[in-house]
Image (cartoon, rainbow, N blue to C red):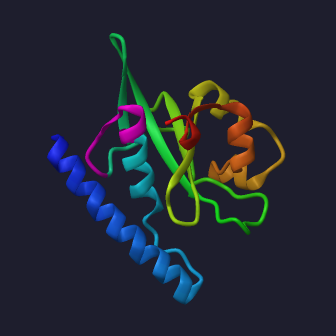
Amino acid sequence: MTASQQQEIEQLLNQAKGLARRYRQLTGKPLGITGEVAEFYAAKFLGLWLLPAREPGYDAILQKGDKKLRVQIKGRCIPKKAKPGQRIGSIKLDKEWDCVVLVLMDEDLEATKIYEADRTAVEEALRFPGSKARNERGALSVNKFKSIGRLIWSHNTT
């Protein structure tokens, strides 16, 4: 993607975020663009190469030296008055991927922090006995993800 294309996409997403904010104000419900916004921020701030839509298992590639990591990207908007126990989207263990990146955003869909967890840590957390949501649907809480991952970007560090 060229710098010009990236700039145009960012402008479009800024417009979409404005519409999403207004939609939430009017309806109290999210518009449903969190995933796309999260993917854009992950690529922008982490230097990921985004893949075409609907790639099974992963959304992007991260080049680390001569190694290419397959990255699954998750996003979560956490408003100021959010209830505890927020969950991220389903993580499929039967698909190919090497790590998961979680982009946390505020109520304006602005990235605040990005966490990364490797496959081993995610698998262990998802297989730990006790939670139907976690074990059967592959849904980790945001707090659990933060505890097994590491902070790799924060808006305070840019």
Residue 84 sits in quarter: bottom right
How many numbered markers are drawn? 0
Query: Is 128 in front, or is 46?
Result: 46
At x 30% / y 55%, what residue is drawn? Answer: 10
At x 41% / y 73%, what residue is drawn? Answer: 18
Question: Is residue 114 visible to us here?
Answer: no
- x, y percentage for residue 66? 33, 10
Question: Is residue 106 visible to us here?
Answer: yes
Work out which residue is located at the far right of the displayed protein and give it.
130
At x 71% / y 55%, what residue is drawn? Answer: 133
In the rendered image, the quadrant that contains the N terminus is top left
Q: Is residue 50 magenta?
A: yes
Query: Is 11 in front, or is 150?
Result: 11
At x 47% / y 81%, what residue is drawn? Answer: 22
Q: Which residues are magenta?
A: 43-53
Instruction: Using residue 52 as the reference point, say whether residue 57 is left or right of it.
Output: right
Residue 43 sits in quarter: top left
Query: Is 29 in front, or is 69?
Result: 29
Examine the rendered structure and indicate whether residue 151 appears above or below residue 7: above
Instruction: Using residue 147 as the reference point, say whether residue 27 is left or right of it.
Output: left
Work out which residue is located at the far bottom of the displayed protein and give it.
26
Instruction: Using residue 50 as the reference point, say whether residue 105 is left or right of it.
Output: right
- x, y percentage for residue 76? 57, 56
- x, y percentage for residue 6? 23, 47
- x, y percentage for residue 91? 56, 45
